[in-house]
Every structure is written in structure tokens, then in C-alpha cells.
Image: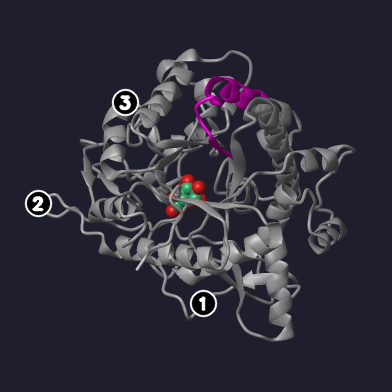
Amino acid sequence: QIKDFPADFLWGAASAAYQVEGAWDADGKGPSVWDTFTKQPGRTFKGSNGDVAVDHYHRLEEDLDLMAQMGLKAYRFSVSWPRVLPAGRGAVNEAGLAFYDRLIDGLLARGIAPVLTLYHWDLPQALQDEYGGWEDRRIIADFAAYCGVLYQRFGHKVQHWVSLNEQNYNLTNAYLLGTHPPAVQDRRRFYQANHHAFLANAQAIALFRQTVPKGLIGPSFAYSPCYPSGSSPEEMLAFENAEEFTNWWWLDAYCLGRYPQAALRFLQANGEAPIIEPGDAELLAAGKPDFIGVNYYYTTTVTDNGLDGQTLQRINTTGQKGTTPSSGVPGLYRTTPNPNLATSNWDWAIDPTGLRTGLRRLTSRYALPLFITENGLGEFDQLTADEQVHDDYRIDYLRQHLLACQAALQDGVELLGYCAWSFTDILSWLNGYQKRYGFVYVDRDEVAVRSLRRIPKDSFYWYQGVIARGGRD
Ligand code: BGP
């Protein structure tokens, strides 16, 4: 039985602008790098894109009413930077801001706390074209100026803010796997882009302190706690390497204002370390978060990797089981399937205990409150003849992960809330619309927009009950 969540626990659900809004060129919006990228052949699953998405932009009231019906206490959404600043900086698009005013006011009127994400990957194309986006230090000032516009406009009515969403996952795809824009594979550029993102994150938080003194802000991190595949010293060392290179590199920079030493030495020796300028350390120290946003889907199991070992990076974007995802760095570690864990159709290990372990590790290392800003199961949902979706597998997944949260609370973890991913079905960046996450089914597929009708799934009514009972199942 699920119980003992704090009375003010933020029971929520999440989304991101590009994945739900649609209206990609409406009312003065500028193009983002995703608008451009998804129109290039072969980039996404069956050419799916967010031009219409689930048309949340035009169906706002209906979606808000469904959130109220569900009893949500919090809704996490992101603001589209080029909807607010079409050229990335300079002129503000009032119509864009007005949309987010309607969204925020609509949430507040229904007693739902808005959780505003400043950046969920939809960089203005203009900034990518002008100076290469995250690869140039000019992004730091431009991002701060954009954030300043939102702080001024919404700071008095939004208390919870997420700075960067999954910098680690987004830039890994963008600069190592070549699967997100600008789709390159270059380790030196990867670390440099990340360095600028850390500085931009810190600058945005430092500005937040001055403008929204009562608010709370932190980045959301795609957190996949590592396991060693065995107990040999070599495997344990590979595990330590993987933790430094896939988790602590980001979280130490955010929360401690520095990079983990062994990883930094390795990168310096390989000519891959970022250029760190005078003043960078001070800026990182001035921009520490109030909480860590945790996006949790799976754990990663690693083993050792010889110097001529695997660098191949592979992800499953079809939902055909068995395209086991892999990644690694020669000499350091490589990922390997975990025979103890079941996997989803996209080969993601299902591991509720890993969430408990991860929350404890973060608490021990950083002593900060945590906020689960994403957790959920992507599956092929089927609509029955009488228009229902019996997603008992999703209910089971969410229930097990909430039980893990409860256990973590009893372990002493401070948890502000839990935002399931996602509220409605949405566009999955590389997997199209067939990989569904929502509590609410949306009638559309990869290319055919269809009716976009909203149909609550069984999980909708289950979560409604969980919230109503304060977490009891
Ligand atoms: C996170 C992103 C979300 C969402 C989710 C599910 O990485 O922050 O935007 O997409 O993962 O991932 P996917 O859509 O690849 O299944």
C-alpha cells in the first residue's frame, strides 16, 4: 500500500512545449531547432514532427479541465523560447507570453500549481544559425535575458521553476550520438557545449535569486543510476567511471560548482576537456539550485571496456524489443544488459528499486531536496472497440515507482513531488506518436493527425484515486 506522502506533496504530471503544443508557426512564433530538424528526411520515426503535436495550444481549456477532473496538484510544462522571443533575443512576442498567461492562470484557477520549465530543447533556430547555439558563450547572456523576461512576467504567480531539462540526455544525443540537432559526433564539442550550458544554468539561477526571491529553481536531470555488472575490482572501477562520466559530471557541476577530478583529468589527457575561463568557477558557485529535478526511467548496468573497446552508441527508436541500447568509452566502461531486470518494448530496464537507490545516492551526495519531474512508461496503447484504454501495465509501473518513492521518504529523502510523464499522449522526440506515455489517450498517429480526441485511460482514473487519497493506493 502506498502511504505517508507529505500533505503538501506535489502530485503532478508533465509535458514539454514541442511535444504537445503544435501551432509551430502561429501568432508570431519563430522556428526552433526541432522545427527545422524534424523536417529533414530520416531524422525521426516515420517523419513524425511537432507541427500539430496534440494541439494543446488550441485545446488548452479542454486539457486544463481534464487536469482538474483528475485532481492534479501540479502540472509541469515548458515554455517555448522561440514562441516568446522569435529570434532568440531582442523583440518579445506578446502573443506568445499571453498563451502562457492563459495556461498559468488556468492552472491557478483550478488549484493546480504550475511547474515551469525554462528550456526543454527547443532552442531558437536563429541562435543556432548565428553562433552555433550551446557551442558559443554568447548563449549564456541570451539564455539569461530570455529567463529574465519570464521571471518578470510570471515570477509573482509561479513558485516552482525548472531551469534546463535533461542537458545530459539532450546534448549527448546532439553531440555524441548525432540524433538530436545539430546532430554531430564530436566529444570535444560535446564537453564545450555542456560547459556553456552549466554556465547558462548558473547565470539563470543567479538572476532568479534577485528577481523571484521566494521561488524555487533547479535543473531536471535524466538520472540513470549505474550498477556494476559484477563484483570484480575491474567491474567496480568501470562502475565508478560510469558514475563520474554519466552522472556526477553534470550533477557535481550543478550542485557543487566543479567537475569530478578523475573524469576531468581523463578528458584533459585526451584533449576533450572544455575550455574553462577565469570567472567560470565563481559563476557556477553563484548558481546552485534549490532542488534537483529527477527524471527517472531506468538504471544502467556497466562492465569494463578495454582500450580498443566499444564506442558504438545505439538506441531503440522502433519499439521492437532486442535492439539493446548500448554506449561506452574505451578504457572506461560500457553498458551491458542486466539479466535481473525486465525491459519495456524500447529496451528500457524497469527498475523501481533503482529509483529508491538513486534518490538515496543523490541525497547522500548533495543533501538537496529532490523533485521527480518525470517518470513513466512508454508503450503501444490500444483503443478498444468501446473506446477505452486498459493500460494496467502502466498502472503497475507507476504504482511500483510510487512505492519506491515512499520507501525513499522513509529512508530520509526529501521529496517535493512526483510528476508522471506524461499528462496526455505526446510526440516522443525520436519514437513518434506510437510510443505513448499519457494518462489521456490522444487520437492521432505518426503522420495522420486524425481527430485529436482526448480519451482518459484506466491509469487516469487510477491516478485520480491515488491523488484523492493522498498517495494511498
Ligand atoms: C525525457 C524527456 C522527455 C520525454 C521522455 C521520454 O528524456 O525529457 O521529453 O521524451 O524522456 O523519452 P522518449 O520520448 O524518448 O521515450
Q: Is residue 73 visible?
A: yes
Q: CA distance from mark 1 to mark 2?
A: 39 Å
Residue highlighted by disc 3: 58
Left or right side of 260 for 279: right
The residue segment tinted magenta is 145-162
Label 2 crowd (10 A; few <14 / some 14-19 / many >=20): few
Q: Is mark 3 within 8 Å of ligand 1?
A: no
Label 1 crowd (10 A; few <14 / some 14-19 / many >=20): some
Q: Secondary structure at mark 2?
A: loop
Q: Amino acid at mark 2?
A: Asp
Query: Which residue is found at the position 28% from the left and 44% from the top?
Result: 70
Sequence-first tag of 2 and 3:
3
Quadrant occupied by the N terminus:
bottom left
Residue highlighted by disc 1: 338
Above or below, 129 against 371 in this view is above
Q: Amino acid at mark 1?
A: Asn
Name the residue at the right extreme.
Answer: 278
Q: Secondary structure at mark 1?
A: loop
Above or below, 339 against 150 in this view is below
The location of residue 145, given as percent across then percent down, is 66, 23
Residue highlighted by disc 2: 386
The location of residue 241, given as percent across then percent down, is 73, 68
The location of residue 336, given as percent across then percent down, is 57, 74
Sequence-first tag of 1 and 2:
1
Q: Quadrant of residue 139?
A: top right
